[in-house]
Image: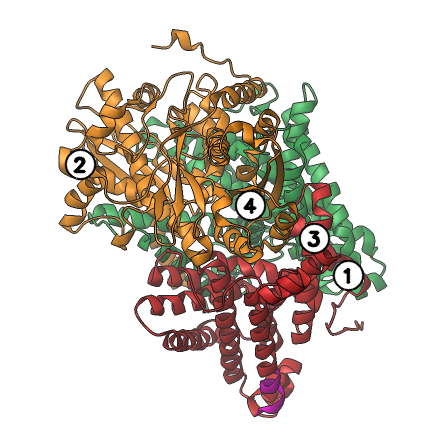
Amino acid sequence: MQFFFEVLIGGLLAGVMYSLVALGFVLIYKASGVFNFAQGAMVFFAALTTVGFISMGAPFWLAVALALLAMAALAFFTERLVLRPLVNQPQITLFMATIGLAFFIEGIAQLTWGAQVHALDLGIADEPIEWLMGNTGMNISKFDLVASGIAAALVAVLAVFFNKTRTGRALRAVADDHQAALAVGISLHRIWVIVWMVAGFVALVTGLLWGARNGVQFALTFLALKALPVLILGGFESIAGAIVGGLIVGASEKLAEVYIGPHVGGGIESWFPYALALAFLLIRPEGLFGERRIDRV
Amino acid sequence: MLRNFRLSALLGAAAFAVAGTAYSQNEQFIPMNGYWVGPYAAGGSGIFGGFIDYLNMVNARDGGINGVKLTYEKCETEYNNARGVECYERTKKRGPTGASLVHPLSTGITYSLIDKGTTDHVPIVSIGYGRTDASDGRVFPWVFPLITNYWSQNTAKIKFIGMKEGGMDKLKGKKIVNIYHDSAYGKETIPVLDAQAKKYGFEVTHIPVAHPGNEQQAQWLQIRQIKPDWVILRGWGVMNPTALKAAAKIGYPRNHIVGVWWSGAEEDVIPAGDAAKGYIAAAFNVSGNNYPVIKEIEKFVYAKGKGEMEDKSRVGSIYYNRGVVFGIISTEAIRTAQEHYGKGKPMTGDEIRWGLEHLSIDDRKLKQLGATGFMQALKVSCMDHEGGGSVKFLQWDGAKWNTITDWIASDQSIVRPMIEESAAKYAKEKGITPRDCSKEG
Amino acid sequence: MLYREAGQFKTTYAADQQLFPIRQDRIGMAILLAVVFVGVPVAAATPALAGMIDFNYWFSGVLIPFLIFSLAALGLNILTGYAGQLSLGSAAFMAVGAFAAYNFELRVPGMPMLASFILAGVVAALIGIVFGLPSLRIKGFYLAVATLAAQFFVVWALTKFGWLSNYSSSGVITAQKLVVFGYAVDTPVKRYLLVLAIVSVMALAAKNMVRSSIGRAWMAVRDMDVAAEVVGIPMVKTKLLAFAISSFYCGVAGALYAFAYLGTVEPAGFELELSFRILFMIIIGGVGSILGSFLGAGFIVLLPIFMDLSAASIERSFGLALPAGLVSNLTLILFGALIVFFLVVEPLGLARLWQIAKEKLRLWPFPH
């Protein structure tokens, strides 16, 4: 039983890390209806830029600030050169454009900083908590706990931003109805730049946490894959959905791998979250927090 | 709109201008089909960096091989099968005698090239990767999985573990976990491990990690339940640092994790930071730039302001040195061929295949090359396309790889029958009649 | 001027319904087919030309993969472009096709190669139907999860179950020798012709299918499924048929990928990345267009090769030794930028660009 809880808690904590990745997708999808394929590339770019500046001798916080600046510039140019010319195009076209953007960002990142892998030390040890280990025999990593704390703080900040600030309300207005938002005088272009900046910020946080976990390398772009089942389960438009979806995916895939995996040859983590999401969607086709749409003829 | 059409027409014309470049006749062409972008770029750029630097060093120092200059051309495969095949097709006819030999540097691309190389008479050299049973040269005349294949490496690893435990008889009742990348590459060593488990009486559990392996909590919690004496890590890419981190997380001692060479470069441990300290990996080449051969490269290439590595500190790293090994093998095969077919002229694919099959690098030769201790002596034959079969073990101390053993020979009594059985099955499936090696010159 | 249908009167319904109603199109198509089927192989056999251009490279390195990817893109376009069901599992259905064809050849003695290919397509179609079932309830981006499940599950299953790869230690299969009607297809030009013939026939079939009643039913479902159901289009049959036929195309493409192109394949070669590539092809080429499948495959397959070749030739002709990685990265950047550029110029894909060109040609050279 203790092992069960260990796996469960480990899974939930891993799930928080997935949620972080999914969050970036949700923000952009909510505000601009774009499924941003480049989110993984943005995570990679943000982390690599930070580490790059650190290796050039910049102190950590300066490097983070510079990376943030780079993400802001990226958001600005993306809006100008990709989103604006494609305004009012079908979703699939915008999706494709973000794929082009992903290639572009990956190329730029590697051209600027090289193909080398880097370590990133945030000063949080990725080791079991002695106290918990001693008292309950459970193995919970300090780093994972801190990472979940950071994720929680990030969500709180986003919540305040969306609910209490003028810009945040404008963002929500745009998410609800582009036309109505335009009608009351909200500038779509400005909102898009802001939302891409926020997504860039989330990408930076994600990149730093995952980078500290597994190293800053190209494989960070693969994180987008981990976010897909989370998004499908939680809905593309809900921040709460991303969090809950992440937790469910994290916990269930770990439990499945440990308890079902050995009986069928293992490695089922690759498809289990999708099977789970599929089963779930069959019952509730609009996702956990997705908006129910009623078709009228 | 029309302007765009005109533009594309222009670009199209440029494409056809590509054909028709003159080659000097006394050149030996070697394609460099590698990868400089994507998730495995660190490995690709390091290995091909070392490879190209070595060729340039030979050109600068000796004026090529007996006066035949070595030329090369890079082609980006992106570690993708389709692109790899395209690169192969593109470069196989380059140079006066076509591609000398091809290093696909991807197990998937190697598989795709086996048939093509055989038909086109281009030797496929896969050093430290590729199809293990191709070590049986009777069935695979054109494929050379040189130095050490995965199965040999694995038996040497068990020997090493036995050494550490104080004798092979001590392995009885021990528990070993094999954590592997869930792919063709990762699965490759399962049968040989099972065979050894039976022979030595240890218990082995195979735990797969789904690609790309950036999350391994479940696997390592399982390992914590099993409490193995040793863990064998058969990872690739991001799976390696993640495994080491996850091991640290459950408090598993890193000096009881033994990795394969694709888990044993600086790039595999640096991202894991302190969690990698003490971790052991098998290797067929060592790291460090204290070897005469690396010094020569620094003297003849880097001192002149040339060299492939933008980051010069990577010279002497595991991947870089592996590329130098690729270079040594390739040039020595060409040299062997020249000694047989006539010095000072470019060799054809057939001739180089002969050179590879009769390649013999003994200790004296290694000393000449400045590579004593850098790589092992090897002798290839028609029967045995592996040639070496030994590995050294390296341990990461947090800053560099330290060599902790001498060359440990593999257990060919286990490996060879398995290779022959597997190759025979392939031959039967493909309708190949194995060569009779006693008739080969 | 040249491209004007004025004066071409249709006097029968049959004439009005033909595949290419405009004479210029028919002539163009005939010329194209003549060139690819006869012209190219003849040119390859002409010693003078063969000395100038490396035809074997163009066949095995460029044209064969281009045709195979076109076929896969065509399959996906039927499902996504015509029936409106987003799929991210094309590579999985290709894998099913490749492994199925291998097993038919291996286990059924004397199995004709073409029959294996067709049966491989059928197996892929059956698997497609299974993973298509959720489409009856889930729509849009969410449906992608069903196809993603297919993607990951199939690759996992092919790696896990040794029987499928005849217990090879690593799960890799080596395609048997390609023999069609007792005739060994062993040179690049023969392989090219075989692939070309299969792709042409299947493209023609697709072109006919999408304008038949089933094709119209697909488009109705795509445009508004509720309305389609109301007017009496059987939803279950229509959607599942789309999955089946699309998977059939992908399955045959996968079999060709293994038998006529790579020779030896591993399950990992059919990763999600390949599915994405095929999706990119139809989006760039044009969603809901047969021609678009070919144009998109051309863009995605040929453009990187072309850029790589130009970079290499620039490097050679100027005697430059560009830093390692620079060319590769610039190619990647340029590739990304070009995708965005083409989408900005024509968001509906290259096929739309072609249509616009045709409209222009009707008036050219007197636009007023």
Q: Colour of chain C?
A: green
Q: Are marks 1 and 3 in contact (CB under 8 Å)?
A: no
Magenta stretch encompasses residue A96: no
For residue A122, say whether it is visible: yes
> Badge 1 sits on which subunit?
A
Could you say where residue A222 lies in the image, as x and y percent from the top left? Answer: 53, 57
**Mark closer to the chain start, 1 or 3:** 3
Could you say where residue B244 lies in the image, as x and y percent from the top left? Answer: 50, 52
Q: Nearer the viewer, mark 1 or mark 4?
A: 1
Which chain is displayed in orange in the rendered image?
B
Q: Secondary structure at mark 3?
A: helix
Q: Which mark is residue A272?
A: 3
What are the residue bounds of the magenta stretch? A159-165
For residue C346, say whether it is visible: no
What residue is pinned by disc 4? C70
Q: Secondary structure at mark 1?
A: helix
Judging depth in this view, the residue of B391 and B45 nearest the camera is: B391
What residue is pinned by disc 1? A280
The answer to whether A44 appears left or right of B217 in the picture is: left
> Badge 4 sits on which subunit?
C
The amino acid sitting under disc 3 is Phe
Q: Which mark is residue C286?
A: none
Q: Are marks 4 and 3 in contact (CB under 8 Å)?
A: no
What residue is pinned by disc 2? B59
Q: Mark 2 packing: few (<14 Cα in 10 Å), some, or many (20+)?
A: some
Q: Residue at x 36, y 66 (%)?
A: A52
Distance (Cα) linking label 1 and label 4: 34 Å
Q: Residue at x 26, y 32 (%)?
A: B372
Distance (Cα) linking label 3 and label 2: 54 Å
Q: Secondary structure at mark 2?
A: helix
